Structures are given as structure tokens and as C-alpha cells.
Amino acid sequence: MDRTEIRKSEKAFLIGVLHGNQTAEVVKEHLDELKQLAETAGAMVVGQITQNLRKINPQYFIGKGKARQIIEQAKTLDVELIIFDDELNPGQVKNFLQLAKNIKIIDRNGLILDIFRKHAQTREAKTQVELAQLEYMLPRLTRQWSHLERQMGGIGTRAGMGEAQIEVDRRLIRQRISKLKKELTHIEQERQTQSKRRKDEYRVALVGYTNAGKSTLMRALSGEDVFIQDQLFATLDTTIRKVQLDQYHSILLSDTVGFIRKLPHDLVASFRSTLLEVFEANLILIVLDAASDQVSEHMNTIEEVLKEFGIKRHKALTVLNKIDLISENKRMNFLKRKYPDAIMVSAKDQLRLDRLIAEMIETMNADYKTVEITFSYDQGKELAKAQENVEVLERHYQNDSIRLKIKGKRDRVNQIINQYQ
Ligand SMILES: Nc1nc2c(ncn2[C@@H]2O[C@H](COP(=O)(O)OP(=O)(O)OP(=O)(O)O)[C@@H](O)[C@H]2O)c(=O)[nH]1
Ligand SMILES: [Mg+2]
């Protein structure tokens, strides 16, 4: 279906643009990240080009002269793929394709979608990615079409059908989109049912920028084997593990898809069911890569995405990960000043995890309630029920009654009080 797929070792140029109030440094950082994305997708980056622009060119995004020059260079170096850090509109892509002939043109969004598609494993992730991809493609179909037409060079059944074929394609895509949406609603319901069953447990969600070390932290805390890779978007699904913090405190810890700046909106929207664990968490651990120069930008992105989902009032702890990589005092002091409440850890070397665990327990305790309730001896059933999903601290057998001292999540304890008291 998609015709902008990135093939292995395909040579690529990256293009960034300096405009507005962006500094050269910021553009470079964005291009570095784009390079990581391109490599994760399998491409081989052979050149990075930045252009100073006072005004965006509506036709080609960059200047037309520059566009021609880049394409010439690309041809000389056998580059088959040009990736823009900024979002291109369908018209710009089309114009570029007319100049570029056999070279593919994609933007950051297209690249991210390509990675997501390559990394999607489960039915849920695959459905979500396909939906996002089709929604991204629908308005761009003209360019995809002209792209396809050229690729096929007049061979095949679709060539030469032009506008009429595009209409047919659009209709097919819309039908597929509505089918995928139904499937996702179904998956979301399944998740919600599972989630109800877990509602009496204390739920903690790891969130953060991609590659910050969320899965590594998950492994360090749970002792279980989870997928860890030095690449972007290694994790696309949500995994949940039970973690015993100490004798009295256990949590359900979830690890989920990472965030990135300029995340395509459709992609975020279609990942709702995957992020359900985050919505319903009692506590969020915001994991940051302390060694990254862009730690504060990462934090901004995380906050933006959480806001977009309406996750604002959650309790959160900030975790600065990868401190094993920090040797300079200056950097350490900067981090301490900037994030005074953050817990510094190394998930990889398992450093200071006890601090993190202690803070989690402290936060949990604040969400817990301890009460005493009395039952008569003929309330056997109620007595048993009241001990579900709570911790029984004391049991007193009196002459005509039993007194329980229980501790549990505030909601659960309130429910017990309302029901049996
Ligand atoms: N030096 C160092 N490297 C770490 C640490 N934690 C994780 N890493 C490395 O960082 C890379 C990314 O780790 P992951 O745990 O896969 O990161 P993630 O946040 O789950 O990333 P995505 O799933 O792609 O969003 C891997 O190469 C890890 O080995 C740490 O504390 N110190
Ligand atoms: Mg991960």
C-alpha cells in the first residue's frame, strides 16, 4: 500500500532549514535526531544539508535553486531518498518529485511512520500504525499516486488511470480506515476489561522520550527480560509487570511507546489504547536521559504529549537516567539545579534504584488509607470480602465481633467502608 517505504542501506540526504528564530545549534540537533531516525529505519545517511531561509518557499519549501542543486548532488552520489526535517505539504512534495524524478521525498512524519510500521509486532500496534499511516496518506494521495505512476513506468493495471483511480483509492482507504477504527475500539474494550481487573492494584507507568532507558529501567526493577535496543522506538506496545518494591508494597509497572518531538498527530491519536495504562496510572515515572544535551527539550515534549492526552493531574516522579555517563561536576550541578526533585539513577548499572524505590513507596503511602472496621461473627462473607485487595495489619477477635485494621488504596478502602460499615 505504501510507496515511500525505506529500504535497507538506501542512501539518504537530510535537509534542515534555519528560519524564524531557530538557532543553527537547534537545527543541527534536530538533524542529528533525524539521522538517528533515518538509521533506525535502515537508511544510510550520506549528507546533511541546512539552508538559511528568511521565508519558506511555498513551492519547494526551500529555494528552487537550492532544490535543483541538492537533486544534482543526490544523483551524483546515487542518493535515492531525501528526508526533510520539517513537514512538507502535499503540493511541495509533488513539485519536488517533478524535479527529482526517481528520488523519494519524505518528511520526518513519513520517516517516523516507516519506523513504526517496521517495529510493530502485535495486532494492536499493527492496527494502530496502519490507521495512522492511512490517515497521513489520504490527503497526500495525489503525490503518492504520481509517485507510484512513475515507479511503475506505465506497467501494471493502475497506470494511466489518473484522477479516477485516485478517487477509487480514496474510497478504499476510507473504508479501510473505518474498519481499522472498529477494530481498535474492540481492542480498547478488551484492554479496558483487563484494566478493570487491575484497578485495585497500584499502577505505575514509565513515560519518556524514546531511547531514554524506560525498558532498561523496567528490566532493572522487575528482573524480567524486556526488549532493549539502542535505537528509536524499540518499544511500541505496552508491557505490564508486577514488581515487589518491598515486603508490603507491590505495583504494576508498565512500559510503553516513547515520545519524540514533532510526533505526527495521527500517530499519537491512534495510540490511545496502547497508552491506556498511562491514563489510568496512579503514578507516572518520567524517565529522562540525563546524558542528552537536549534533556530540557525532551521534558517539554513529554509534557506536551501528556497534555495532548489530557494527562495533567497525575502524580509524577522525575527520573534522570544514565547518570553513569556523567562525569563532569558542572553537568551534574546543572541537572541538580534544573531538576531539584529528580531521582538520579543508572538503570543499566543499577545505581541508586533503592532511592527510586523508596520514593515510590513514599508516594504510594500517601495514596493509601488505614482504617479499622468491626464485623459481627455472622458476617463471614463480608469479612472475607473486606480483606480482598488490601493489606490486613491487625485482626482482633473480641467477644461478639472481629475488628480488622486494613490498609489499601484510598478508593478501595473507601469502598469497603461504604459497603460494610
Ligand atoms: N549508559 C547507560 N545506558 C543506558 C542506561 N539505560 C539505558 N541505556 C541504554 O540506552 C539505550 C535505550 O534503552 P531502552 O531501555 O531500550 O530505552 P527506551 O526508553 O525503552 O527506548 P524506546 O523503547 O525506543 O522508546 C540502550 O542502548 C540501553 O542500553 C543507563 O542507565 N546508562
Ligand atoms: Mg523501550
Image: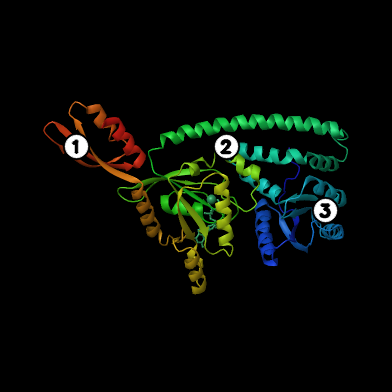
Here the colouring is rainbow
Would you name the residue on which mark 1 appears?
A: 403
Quarter of the image where the C terminus is located: top left
Mark 1 CB within 8 Å of ligand 1: no
Would you name the residue on which mark 2 appears?
A: 124
User: Residue at point 42% right, 62% down?
Assistant: 351
Say what secondary structure mark 3 lies in: loop
What kind of residue is marked 1?
Arg
Cβ–Cβ under 8 Å for marks 2 and 1? no
What kind of residue is marked 3?
Tyr
When asked about the image quadrant of residue 135, the answer is: top right
Nearer to us in this view, 251 or 119: 251
Residue sitting at the far left: 399
Q: Estimate the x, y position of residue 301 in percent, counting from the top left.
A: 58, 54
Residue sitting at the far bottom: 329
Specify few, some or many for label 1: CA neighbours under 10 Å numbering under 14, 14-19, or 20 or more: some
Q: CA distance from mark 3 to mark 1?
A: 77 Å
From the viewer's perspective, is residue 300 above or below residue 91?
below
Would you name the residue on which mark 3 appears?
A: 60
